[in-house]
Every structure is written in structure tokens, then in C-alpha cells.
Amino acid sequence: MEASLPWQPDEAVAGRVEALAHTLRATVRDTLEPLVLAWHPSLRERSSAEFNKMLELSTKMTLVGQACAEVLGAPFEARHRRIAALFGGCCFLADSFIDNFGAAVAREYLRRFSELFATGWFEVRNERERLFYIMAARLFAERDVLDPMVRQSVLKLHEAQALDALLRIEPSRTALMSEAQRRILLKRVARDRGGHTIILLTALLAPALPVSLLAGLFAAGSLFMYIDDHGDCFTDRREGRLTYMNQLRRPQRTLHKIVTAHFLCVLATLPSGAGRDILLGTLARYYSTRLEKHRAQRKRAGTAWDVYE
Amino acid sequence: MNEAAIQRRPPVVDEVALALQGLRQAGLGTGYDVLVRIDNRSAEAGAPYQLDAARGVLHRRDCRALPKSAPTFALGRVSEEALSRACKRCKPMIEPTQPKTRERADVLFGLVSLVDQFGSVLKERGKDFRQTPEGRRLDTQLTEVYQGLGAREKEVLDVVLATVNDILARLRSIDGALNREEKKEGD
């Protein structure tokens, strides 16, 4: 790791995170693969790289889900692993609808998601949408979706994702802003995307969210997003996607400050124990691997600022 | 049917979920504007409390100490645990008459569990059950719950109850078709 963090996983924690990731990956595959084969077989047969990416994202969600459940002292059994895996699958597909098919399609999906959340109606138009709808329906069948925290978390995450997408496809939204204003907005969007993701995941897994733990969970979720955006810095720039991290001249230095501050927040607000260890251990592991990804991308494409310029 | 085919067979519950969406496309769901409404912002706007998720602080609605950019959740009622994180400026307290939404939801979910338990003989068993002391008690309770719901909630509940018959009919149809198919493969 580049520089010291306020907390470092010892060998036992690092080993447990590795072992959990391995075990949960198999569980996630058992949950998602039959659905993919049944409803969107070409994702498995023709696009195995994308399928594997979906499994990795869902595995990360499930690992984080287990950590959050343990922090809350809630059980994390077969049903909870299934919920976390389905949530990861839904997030992956929803992101792909918005990110992979151009601006006009992204706008149309944002409109249809808003309609889905306002009315429950979703006109299934192709295999990928069918898979998404089936995963969402199964996920919502596992939990009281009208629980005030759950339904608000769904909406908050949707709003944050929508704003992130609109900032990318409608540059005019930030054209009149100063550089500092734009950075503040982008940082807030990243914070909310990550924070609401982990709050929704935890709300789906646990019967109640203690207010005293909310800030720590939200900080951990936000940190995942900052690390993620840092890892994708160069790819995002090439694809014209605005993120807080790719607007910085020295993203690595800023990220380290953010990681340090967020680790301290998690340490101060979440109770010590296995759950917090897994959460911080996963974050430390993710930070380390995404720094490597960032370096690899820079080697391929020049300096960070060169690519943007 | 071989093992691979059985594993790949779409579960009935997924077929039902798709059939439900198909109702609207087939014109059968017209008139039902709302199937289930997750977006509850209009009701949440009047909630007395706001929870700042980034700081883990509970505020009264419109508290000036609540940053505009804060990621907030609207709360209709709060627990003692939430009050331990109360904003020192607006000092939120538990209101004496908080809405009993949780109790209403519990009764509604009890209704759903009855639907699940009675399945295809729902109506017949329901008529019998209504005559029992427990049924009469539940009937009174449900009537009170129904009267306590807002107009939108009543609409949603009406849609759900109206579509239960459609779902059960489709379930029976799909289940029958699958059983016939399995029997044919077995022969």
C-alpha cells in the first residue's frame, strides 16, 4: 500500500476477507447463473466477460452486505446472501442500461425507471430488461419494499444515479459553473451514489437501521465510489464521463486524504468487531487493487492530465 | 425432462411477475394507474423529521442546521435510539400522536400471509373463516385499517386484491401446463 492508513487489516482479517470473497463468489454464481440462463442466456453464452463482471460486482456487494449485517448484529444467512446477490445483479444491469447504449437510450431508461418507481409498471422490451425485471421482482419479494427506509433508499439511489448520468450526457448543466463549484457538485454526486447504495443494501438485509450507525455506513459506501472512480479515471475521461476524481490534477493524493478521513469516520461511528473489520478490510483491499488499476491505465495512456487534455 | 432442462426451466414465480406486467400490455391492466408505488415523495414531504445520513443526525423538518446538500431521509416517527442522535439546535422530540403506519403495515402483511396460506381456495376458506370469532375480529380490524388508509393507499390495495384472482388463475394455468409437460416427459 502507498502510504499508511489509520487502520490496516492484520493477517487474520485479510485472510478472512479473501476466504469470504471466495465462498461468496460461488454463492453469487449459484443465485444469478440460473436466472441468466433462463431469462438472458446470451449474456452467459456470448458475453462471458460481462457475465463475470456481473458476478464480481455482486460478490463485492455480498461481501459488503455481510459486513454491514455483522455490524448491525443481524443474521446473514442463505436468504440474505440471495438478497445481496440479486441487489448486485440489479445494480450491474441498471448501470449498463444507463452507461452502455448512448445518451438517448440513457435518458429513456431514466424515464422508465422513474415510471417503474412511481407506478410499478415496467414494459419489458428485450432479454436484458427481462432479466433485470425478474431480478428486481425477486429482490422486492424478499423484503417489505414499502418500508419507509427501503422505498426512500431506492429513490435516493435512483436520483443520485440519474444526476450522475445527466451531468455526463448534458454538459450544459455544469457549463456556467466555476471549476470549484463543479468539483463540489461532482464530489457530492459520488458521495450520494456510494452512500445510498450501501444504505439500500443494508436496509434490504436488516429489519431496521440504527441512526447511530448510519454515518459510518454512508461513509464506507461513499468511499467505495471514490475509490472506484479513481480506478476508472482514465477510462471515464476517454468516454467523456465527468467524475470528481477525473477533474483533479493529483487524484491519487486527494484519494489518500479521502480514504484516511473516511476510515477515521468508520472507526469513530461503527462498533469494533468482525463486521467493521470485514468492511474496512474490504475497503483496504479495494483501495490497493484500484490503485494498481489506475497505474496500469496511466501507463497505457500517458499522464492523468494528458489524457484529459 | 432431463436435469439440465429442469434447471433451466423458469420458475413459476418469475412467470407470474412477467404475466403481471403483461396485463397492462394486453390492456387488462388499464385503469390501474398504480401497481405498487415506491416513490412516496409527496407524502414524505410532510414528515416531521429529517435524518441526515452522512452525519447520522436527526433534525426536525426545516431545521436550519440541516445542510441543503445533506442526503436526507424523511421520517414520520422516530425511536428513542434516533433521539440519541438529535440535532442540538432544533432538538427533535417524540410527538405524542405519531401515525401508526407500522401497525397498519403489519396487519396488511398478515393479510398477505393469509393469501399465501390459503392459495387457490382463498375465497371459499375466506367465507368460512369470516364466520369464526377470530375471523370476525380480523374483519373489524381490517375495516378499521382500510378506513385509516389514504386515498392512494386504498387504490393500491384495491389493485392488489383485484389482481390476486388473475395471478392465482395464471399460477394454476402455468402449474397445470408444467405438470402435463413433466408427465408427458415421464411417459
Image (tube, coloured by chain):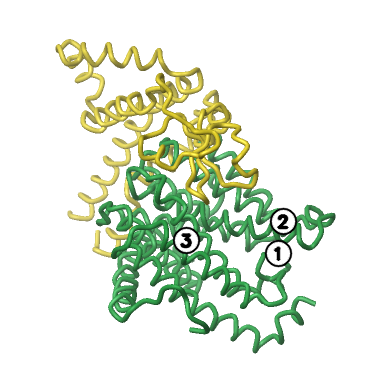
Q: Quadrant of residue B9?
A: bottom left
Q: Residues within 10 Å of mark 3 (few under 14, many from 20)?
A: some
Residue beneath label 1, please? A242
Q: Determine whether, in the image, residue B84 is placed left or right of residue A197.
A: left
The label on residue A265 is 3
Check chain identity for marks 3 and 2: say if they share one.
yes
Instruction: Check disc 1: other Cα within 10 Å, few if <14, some if 14-19, many if 20+.
Output: many
Which circle marks residue A215 in the picture? none
Q: Residue furthest bottom?
A: A299
Question: Badge 2 is on which residue?
Answer: A167
For the residue marked with disc 1, what is the amino acid? Leu
- Foreground residue, A82 or A44? A82
Q: Residues within 10 Å of mark 2 (few under 14, many from 20)?
A: some
Q: Earlier in the sequence, mark 1 or mark 3?
A: 1
Q: Colour of chain A?
A: green
The residue at the point 40 percent across, 77 percent down is A8
SS type, badge 1:
loop
Provide residue A202's location: percent of width, then percent of height: 39, 52
Label 2 is placed on what type of residue? Leu
* Total count of labels: 3
Q: Give yes or no for contact between labels 2 and 1 (Cβ–Cβ under 8 Å).
A: yes
- CA gap between label 2 and label 1 equals 7 Å
Q: Quadrant of residue B83?
A: top left
Outermost residue toward the right? A176
Q: How far is mark 3 from mark 2, CA to CA?
A: 29 Å
Question: Which amino acid, by three-letter code, is at mark 3?
Answer: Cys
Which chain's residue wears label 2? A
Dot 2 falls on a residue whose secondary structure is helix
Q: Colour of chain B?
A: yellow
